[in-house]
Amino acid sequence: MIMEVLIASSAEEICELLGQDNSRQLLAGGTDFMVEVNYRHRSPSSVIAIDRVPELRNWHHDGDSVVIGSCVTYREIERGPLATLVPALAQAARTVGSPQIRNAGTIGGNIGTASPAGDMIPVLSALGAEVSLRSSEGKREISLDDLIVGVKQTSLGQGEFIESVRVPVLESPQEFLKVGSRSAMVISVTSLALITYPKTQSVGIGLGAVNPRPTRARQAEEFIKDFLNWESMQVDPSGLDHFKELVSEASRPIDDHRSIAAYRRHSIGVLAQRALTRIFSERSPSV
Amino acid sequence: MSKVTQDHLNVNGTKFTIDDSWLGESLLYTLREQLGLYGSKNACEQGECGSCSILLDKALVCACLVLTGSAIGRDIKTIESLAPEGSLSVIQQAFVDAGAIQCGFCTPGLLVTIEDFLDDNAEPTELEIREAISGNLCRCTGYGRIVEAVRIASKASTDTQGTADDGN
């Protein structure tokens, strides 16, 4: 039974409260946590509400990147300046739940919950996001891919919490695509983010809901390089079939109540090809 | 830091004293079982159905996903605040006119959602309406008459606005 609710007003206070007792549960948007409370699956004795902490609620520019506080909501990511700065993150945010869920749920909650189907995860992975962690011992930065170590498991230390996440501002095309049974209120069957990096003439591909932890389709990223023309923004279609196969091969999906592994493996490849050809039009080099 | 012990919930402009034994419950449970505000409906308790939609600091959320303790000191608006007792708001009247109510269980959540939505977007397209109500499940109507009610309310509000503007 929840015996105590503490409302933190600064990141420093969260450190103190966790320093006193690291079994205290952090509460951000509550969209996952409260379901478990309502169904009596979880009942910590002490809860720290962190969603009023100003430094966690804000985001800011920092050179070529944006630093997004862990309690920034999907709604804030979906619209306004952040949507222009990190468009794939905005696309992903818009597919989360419903307006009600997007007003409450937070990017830090999505990371901390570490569900393989978390919609921020493939985008952050493809962007090479760095997560800033904090505790009474100090701060450290860790890549998202190293923070999430398994299904709903993170490498967060005792008394440590997610302060913010840093992503690059690239000003080049990005895509997020998701398969589900309807357009709203749906947990991903599969999802995929494709980020273009014109400077290195490469793409980053993050896979969602097909692996226990964040996964990039590295072989597919490497393979497709030779088929892309960055001046005309065209792709040589002769590379697409193998590209699709490589993306599917990077997935280790499971059968569950939402879908079967075979469909997930198939659809993740389809999403990759679709995302790529939305950005690069199909044209043979000879034409 | 503030440890929430005995404190007040600010619901529809009224302060209610809440015993600390309720702070670990969902706000929906507290609204209904402690404060007797039965307008917010309890169906799924997992944020799927939108029947308990309320405004928390002007943001549309599901009351079932808010911890009572974390709502202390915030501005809470429920369906009961939509219109004074005995009268109907524009959108409530539009629901009646369009026949957008069958069993009525989803209606309070939809009304709060649509009030909030039309505040932001006075003349929405059908697609925008459907996206706005995507978190409110109705198993009776098929949504056609609900969408029609939003159109009626939108038109009624903008017409009223037009008249007011003409008068200035």
Image (cartoon, rainbow, N blue to C red):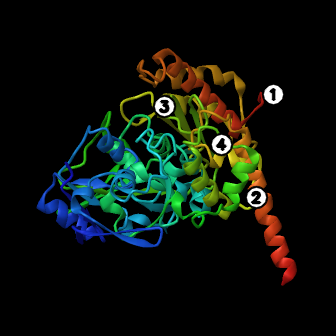
Q: Eyeballing the image, is A190 above or below A257?
A: below
- Residue where numbered disc 2 is placed: B154
Q: Chain of mark 4?
A: B
Where residue A40 sits: x, y (%)?
26, 39
Q: Chain of mark 2?
A: B
One can see residue A83 in this view: yes
Q: Establish whether labels 3 and 4 are both on one chain.
A: no
Q: Toward which corner of the image does residue A51 lie, by quadrant?
A: bottom left
Q: Eyeballing the image, is B105 above or below A162?
A: above
Q: Chain of mark 3?
A: A
CA–CA distance in space, label 3 to label 2: 47 Å
Q: Establish whether labels 3 and 2 are both on one chain.
A: no
Q: Nearer the viewer, mark 3 or mark 2?
A: 2
Picture residue at 71% right of the left edge, 28% below the top: A236
- Residue where numbered disc 3 is placed: A217
- For the residue labelled by badge 2, is the local secondary structure a helix, a strand or a loop? helix
Where residue B22 sits: x, y (%)?
26, 57
The amino acid type, in three-letter code, at marker 1 is: Ser
The amino acid type, in three-letter code, at marker 2 is: Ser
Q: Residue most toward the bottom?
A: B168
Picture residue at 53% right of the left edge, 29% below the top: A220
- Residue where numbered disc 1 is placed: A286
Q: Compare marks 4 and 2 and give the one earlier in the sequence.
A: 4
- Residue where numbered disc 4 is placed: B101
CA–CA distance in space, label 3 to label 1: 28 Å
The quarter of the rendered structure image containing the C terminus of chain A is: top right
